[in-house]
């Protein structure tokens, strides 16, 4: 049976690997009312933020109140409002998870923010950004079962309302706070994208050599690539494609090993390697 390993298959494999990724990218989208500064009442707002799965509680922008409140940071956050984007990272950025918290009644909520330390002199609609945040609130307080950092966006379906605050600063030093609440929104996760400039077996072999893994794992992968080269020299394109399938499978098998297990390939390196392998497969030609 011939294994035709195309981009579709490889992207599915990448999606599997994505579960082991350590960096998550979430996207929050809604509209924002900018009429207080002379803008439209429904400007598209897109917040793209990236964070590591292994951020520890107590690293966020607020003091934790265990076990109901935990903050996680720093994160990277891009706020896209209409035509403008500001980028923030570092101290002051973060995600705060509230589980069964609240001063008057219990609620669960999820706060993502950055402040002027992060956004600096970048501007949104002509204004500097002193603080930007969005908050998802679940009045039923079933959205979270603990204050652990969510690495899936599934919780957001239980939220009842989204609040967005932007504290802006004009050129005269006046603060203006814009807010919107109760608008439709989405929170989605972006799977890792495939990005590699490697297109040849020689380059792929060099990438294997540079992996942070055991010499035995590298040897196994090199032997498979030797078999690919031998098949190509014999004019057996189908055989070469089949061996490349073995290569991808061997990479995934090692990427899925638990941290500390010998021969493990770090998932981010594995993801890039599979992307490179996909490029090589496309360049093999033949069917
Ligand atoms: Ca709860
Ligand atoms: Ca709810």
Image (spheres, rainbow, N blue to C red):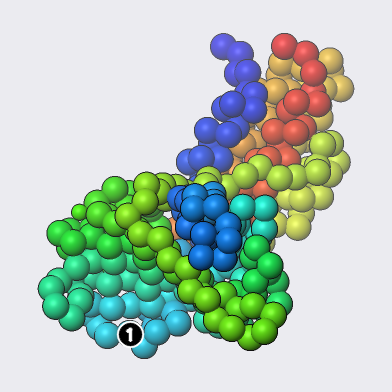
Q: Is residue 145 above or below residue 233?
A: below
- In the structure shown, which secondary structural element does the residue marked by tag 1 occupy? loop
Q: Nearer the viewer, residue 282 or 76?
A: 76
Q: Nearer the viewer, residue 215 or 156?
A: 156
Query: Is residue 140 visible to the viewer in this orientation of the structure?
Result: yes
The image shows residue 136 at horizontal and vertical percentages of 33, 61
- Residue at point 75% right, 45% down? 196
The image shows residue 40 at horizontal and vertical percentages of 55, 52
- Residue at point 61% right, 52% down? 82
Q: Tell whether 90 sits left or right of 97.
A: right
Q: Is residue 172 above or below residue 89?
A: below
The residue singled out by tag 1 in the image is: 64
Q: Tell whether 229 sits left or right of 148.
A: right
Q: Nearer the viewer, residue 187 or 66?
A: 187
Quarter in which the N terminus is drawn: top right
The image shows residue 134 at horizontal and vertical percentages of 42, 65
- Residue at point 43% right, 66% down? 179
Quarter in which the C terminus is drawn: top right
- Residue at point 49% right, 53% down? 41
């Amino acid at each position: 049976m011939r294994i035709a390993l195309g981009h579709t298959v490889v992207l599915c494999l990448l999606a599997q690997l994505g579960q082991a990724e350590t960096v998550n990218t979430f996207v929050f989208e809604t509209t924002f009312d900018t009429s207080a500064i002379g803008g439209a009442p429904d400007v598209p707002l897109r917040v793209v933020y990236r964070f590591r799965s292994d951020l520890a509680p107590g690293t966020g922008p607020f003091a934790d109140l265990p076990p109901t409140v935990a903050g996680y940071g720093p994160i990277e956050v891009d706020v896209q409002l209409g035509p403008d984007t500001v980028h923030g990272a570092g101290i002051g950025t973060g995600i705060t998870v509230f589980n069964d918290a609240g001063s008057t009644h219990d609620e669960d909520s999820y706060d993502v923010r950055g402040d002027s330390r992060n956004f600096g002199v970048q501007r949104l609609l002509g204004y500097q950004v002193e603080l930007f945040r969005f908050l998802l609130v679940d009045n039923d307080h079933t959205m979270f079962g603990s204050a652990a950092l969510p690495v899936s966006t599934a919780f957001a379906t239980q939220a009842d309302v989204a609040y967005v605050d932007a504290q802006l600063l004009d050129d005269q030093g006046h603060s203006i706070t814009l807010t919107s609440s109760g608008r439709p929104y989405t929170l989605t996760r972006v799977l890792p994208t495939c990005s590699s400039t490697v297109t040849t077996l020689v380059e792929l072999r060099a990438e294997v050599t540079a992996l942070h893994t055991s010499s035995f794992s590298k040897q196994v992968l090199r032997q498979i690539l030797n078999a690919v080269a031998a098949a190509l020299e014999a004019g057996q394109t189908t055989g070469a494609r089949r061996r490349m399938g073995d290569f991808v499978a061997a990479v995934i098998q090692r990427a899925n090993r638990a941290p500390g297990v010998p021969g493990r390939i770090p998932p981010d390196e594995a993801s890039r390697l599979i992307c490179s392998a996909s490029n090589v497969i496309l360049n093999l030609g033949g069917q």
